[in-house]
Image (cartoon, rainbow, N blue to C red):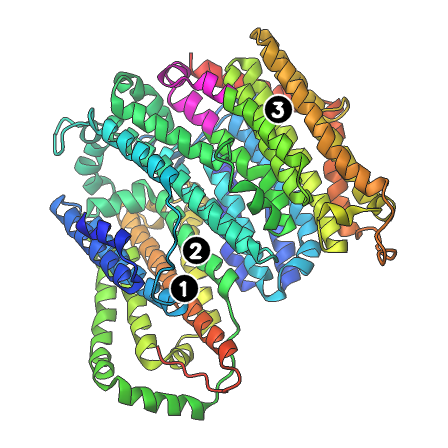
Amino acid sequence: MVTAIAIVRLKDLFAVIMLSGIYSLLSASFFVTMDAVDVAFTEAAVGAGISTLLLLVAITMTGRAEHPDRHKPILALAVVTVTGGLLIYGTFDMPYFGSGQAPVHLHVAPRYINDSMTEVGVPNIVTSVLASYRGFDTFGEVVVIFTAGIGVLALLSVVPRPVTIAKINSLNDSLHEQHLILRIVSKMLLPFIMLFAFYVQFHGDYGPGGGFQAGVIFAVAIILYAMLFGMITARRVINQSFIQLIAAVGVLLYGSIGVVALLNGKNFLDYSVLSDDPIAGQHLGILLIELGVGLTVASVMIIIFFSFAGRRDYLRHLNDNSKGSNNTSC
Amino acid sequence: MLAHLPVLQVIVPLLAAPLCLFLTRSRLVWVFALAVSALAFLISCLLLQQVMSSGTIIYELGGWEAPWGIEYRIDPLNALLLLIITGISTIVLLAAHTSIQQEIPEERHTFFYILYLLSLAGMLGIVATGDAFNVFVFLEISSLSGYALIALGKDRRALWAAYQYLIMGTIGATFILIGIGLMYQMTGTLNMEDLSKRLPEVEHTRTVFTAYAFIIVGICLKLALFPLHLWLPNAYAYAPSIVTAFFAATATKVAIYLLIRFTFSVFGLTFSFTALPLQILFLTLGLLGIFAASTAAIYQKNVKHLFAYSSIAQIGYMIVGFSVSTTTGLMATLLHLFNHALMKSALFLALAAVVYRIGSVQLSQFHGLGRQMPFTMAAIVIGGLSLIGVPLTVGFVSKWYLIMAVIENGWWPVAVLILLGSLLAVVYVWRLVEAAYFKPPLPGRDTIKEAPLSLLIPVWILVIANIYFGIDTRLSVQVTQAASMSLFGVSP
């Protein structure tokens, strides 16, 4: 609450972004106390991690201070007050927090809790609801992320200018002096971050985690690399059109699992056809679709970061075209 | 494969979108997208036929039965919407290749088609599903791609328009999500059919009332109901012409569908119209919308703005029909939904042809176009006549049913007001006709030629549809009647 008010009042955008990171982290811990570990994990990875990073890239382009503006949005305040009032009004008849008699716990949920082990065979109930019972929603979410990536590309894509090797080397040396400690530490960290991403990816069946979180963590590793070693070097490691194809492959992998079920005469996304034993089929299906999710999420995050950062280079290139120097440190 | 039609309807365009990335040439992507859209149209025709002959189709996704898994539920109402969306999308795509040559840089063409297909799949997903949360997921797909498509416009103001739409649209979507969350809390289910059974037990609670209020306001933001319409004119005016033609005919229609679905199928008629003074509220807002937006349309200098305001007015007519809340009223709404999709796509596609030739849609630039682009301008005139509601066009059919519905209820003053609203349409259409036919061409404009056939053919398909469905109303009336009957049958 204090953080939220501070975010609204502050004029310094850098501080605002840092505070919103803290806000996400706080809400993540809030979710943990409410026993929603999967949600907390996602909030920590996405809210506190990647969105803070992307916002930081954005303010390198816009500048740090908010424009002062004088108009007083009375009408907006009134609308917000009415909305908030209505929300509080709505809480009066809600079931008590944690009550076992709440309708949520009596209708659909019991089957998820009691039977998901025999029907889907995955210990983490959240994963089995997410990936199997309501797998189509998750498919939709993946497409949402894919859409976001394509949208950013459509609006911001800039064809990178060819750069000579000598230039990269000279740039690399200058960066090396500036960020020596950071570079070495992060070099040591990167393999572990990636390893952790894979752990989260494939452990989603048993504990909190899964494709969404893993994809974000993996993307963070790449972004860290790009920030410390320069965009040009990072572009050489990760080819732009290749990463776009990976994003598409993720969605297609998910979709094709569904289509396989269709071709076998079952309904879309019915994983039980993937193996002779329906439970094993469910298991395999969930593993594969989580992989699809991870691929798409990681590559879209990288695409978004590269497009933003590439835009920044592009703008700078326009600005000091005369100087001819397009330094690319982040 | 026939049993899988409901899901194929949505996943064909959905999976085709990422596939586009593998095709490199703009022309190839266009042919592919067109084929996909045509296939979707075929599927929707088959679905409509199946629904009309054998009733509601239920499809369980993932093989899990309804309240646990997600189901698709196709009844005459969604089948009609699916048909409209895929049909318009296909015809508009036919013109896309030529039109976007001038408006979108070459290297972004592939992204344009991907976003277009995603937007199409999103709308189809919203309409086909029988699960409240699934609606939200697909709403996100269609809105996100919509914002990006609008921002692709050539004019720099397109970015600002898309941003405005993004803010308003996101607020709307969040409201809908809050409403769905509250409903889930009170009933423990997300399935619409199941919700409609379980809501009556808890309908007196303040939480359900709040849920209802949030959902209605959220949907009204999306459908640009007066006075929540502020995002619409700029979004339509600065988007690429093809996108305008597609969205004007489909996007707000999907929101109207959601309004009907939630009030009739989920909350039930009795609750919907007693919890809030909805009838009088919608009637007033609808009528105010007709007059305010039609008057605003008269004073516009940009023809895209003009027709965008006219769209808001047409939404007003649909809302009036909705507020009557009888079978005839609902039928009028659905008929107008169908007919308005035909009119507006024809008009905006014709404007795309104008943009292709003269690069502008300012009214002052239209001088003399009547002689220089006779076929395009004739299409605009017929579309305009249809907007007014002249006999032998589709506009007449929907106005006819609307007035019948209103009179059936004994609301004579409302019927008079609807007729007066049509007179305002005469004024703004006349301004366009005057500029195009009765003013000499601008100096230096003698060489303007008729638009290329690749644009004229889709425009005229739509214009002929405007006339055909104005004369032969069997299909539209039969389907809308079945749809409104089934809605009233479900909710006593």
Residue B359 percent location from the top left of the image: 72, 55
Residues marked 2 and 1, same chain: yes
Q: What's the CA distance linking mark 3 and mark 1?
A: 43 Å
Q: What's the CA distance linking mark 2 and mark 1?
A: 8 Å
Judging from the image, mark 3 belongs to the subunit labelled B
CB-based contact (under 8 Å), mark 2 and mark 1: yes
Q: Which residues are magenta?
A: B259-283
Q: What's the CA distance linking mark 2 and mark 3?
A: 34 Å
> Which residue is under mark 1?
A304
Which residue appears at 75% of the width and 28% of the height?
B468
> Which residue is under mark 3?
B335
Which residue appears at 22% of the width and 83% of the height?
A184
At label 1, the amino acid type is: Ile
Residue A132 percent location from the top left of the image: 31, 44
Q: Nearer the viewer, residue A292 or B63?
A: A292
Q: Is residue A219 magenta?
A: no
Secondary structure beneath disc 1? helix
> Which residue is under mark 2?
A148
In the image, is residue B152 above or below residue A322? above
At label 2, the amino acid type is: Ala
